[in-house]
Image (spheres, helix red, strand yellow):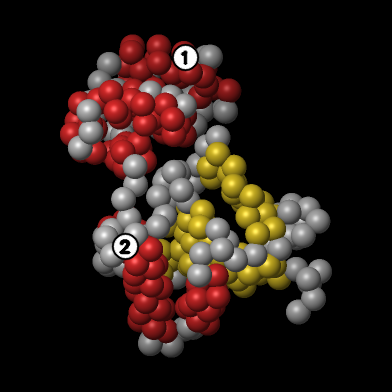
Amino acid sequence: MKKEEVYKYSFKLERKTASLYVQNTGRQQCAPRYSWGPGIRDHYLIHHVLSGKGCLIVGEERWPLSKGDTFLTYPDTPILYYADEQDPWEYVWVGFYGSDARKLVEQTAFAPARPVLHAYFPDEIARMLLDLCGEYGTAPWCGPAMTGQLYRFLAFLIERAQCLSGGAAVREDCAETAAHYIMNHYEQPITIAALADLTAVSQSSLYRSFKARFHVSPKQFLNSYRIERASFLLTNSIYSIREISNSVGFDDPLYFSRAFKRLKGISPRAFAERYGARPQEE
């Protein structure tokens, strides 16, 4: 197929309650500057670049990508990705979820602060994802066949990660481990002391690791992530400011409003109204 021939084969499957299932899959040759986002997904999504170039943006981080690279986007995480203008990428993808999905992903070489694997077993990953996509169909056996391919693919990623780390599970540094925990438990009470215990380091070591990796303190990272989640909720008018405050881990709505204004420059209500939403009264 010629490079200039733009195409998209996209297959969506019925949502399930299962330990692991394929939610969507497909293959696409993108047009120049074709993009998805900014937006969030409600499931895990792995893309593998078959040819061309593009870019992934997660928060303030930007990852240029090219043939052989693989990237993972996490549920409920704001993202944007787009094709290069001169050499737009072609990729194959699989979206998946289930009660075991997070546990399996955590054993791979991916991490929230490291969503890209550059030239990481590109031939094997391309072959397995193309095989998975090729199993799509309406026959009764197609769903189980795709799930089997997904388990095989994740098992390969886990095995490679462990082999490359000398036979042990991949160990993120303490900042990445703590950041991962924050992104998955931000709505719960979190203290810096608890994060230090979680990562088996002192609070001062955790502070230095965060400053080196993210250029902010653990507390600033926690508040910033909570505010970003609140920003998303504020664009939905069915919630009150108090409800949003509680939903992202702030017990005190007044403290939440001050923290939000300090980071965003305007109040939560003004932010919501800027995007056409009107939060309910308390």
On the image, numbered disc 1 is attached to which residue?
261
Observer-nearest of 166 and 279: 166
Observer-nearest of 138 and 229: 229
The local secondary structure at tag 1 comes to helix
Left of 29 or right of it: where is 278? left
In this rendering, the label closer to the viewer, 2 or 1: 2
Of the 4 image quadrants, the one containing the C terminus is top left
Relative image position of residue 172 (x, y in whole percent): 34, 47
Left of 202 or right of it: where is 46? right
Relative image position of residue 83 (x, y in whole percent): 70, 55
Residue type for callout 2: Gly
156 vs 85: above or below: below
Observer-nearest of 238 and 207: 207
Asked if one can make out residue 57 in the rendered structure from this viewpoint, the answer is: yes
Of the 4 image quadrants, the one containing the N terminus is bottom right
Q: Residues within 10 Å of mark 2 (few under 14, many from 20)?
A: few
Q: Residues within 10 Å of mark 1 (few under 14, many from 20)?
A: some
144 vs 93: above or below: below
Asked if one can make out residue 223 in the rendered structure from this viewpoint, the answer is: no
Left of 37 or right of it: where is 44? left
Q: Residue at image x 52%, y 14%? A: 266
Residue type for callout 1: Lys
The local secondary structure at tag 2 comes to loop
On the image, numbered disc 2 is attached to which residue?
166
Q: CA distance from mark 2 to mark 1?
A: 47 Å
Q: Residue at image x 48%, y 67%? A: 94
- Mark closer to the chain start, 2 or 1: 2
- Residue 87 figure quarter: bottom right
- Disc 2 and disc 1 in contact, CB within 8 angstroms: no
- Residue 245 figure quarter: top left
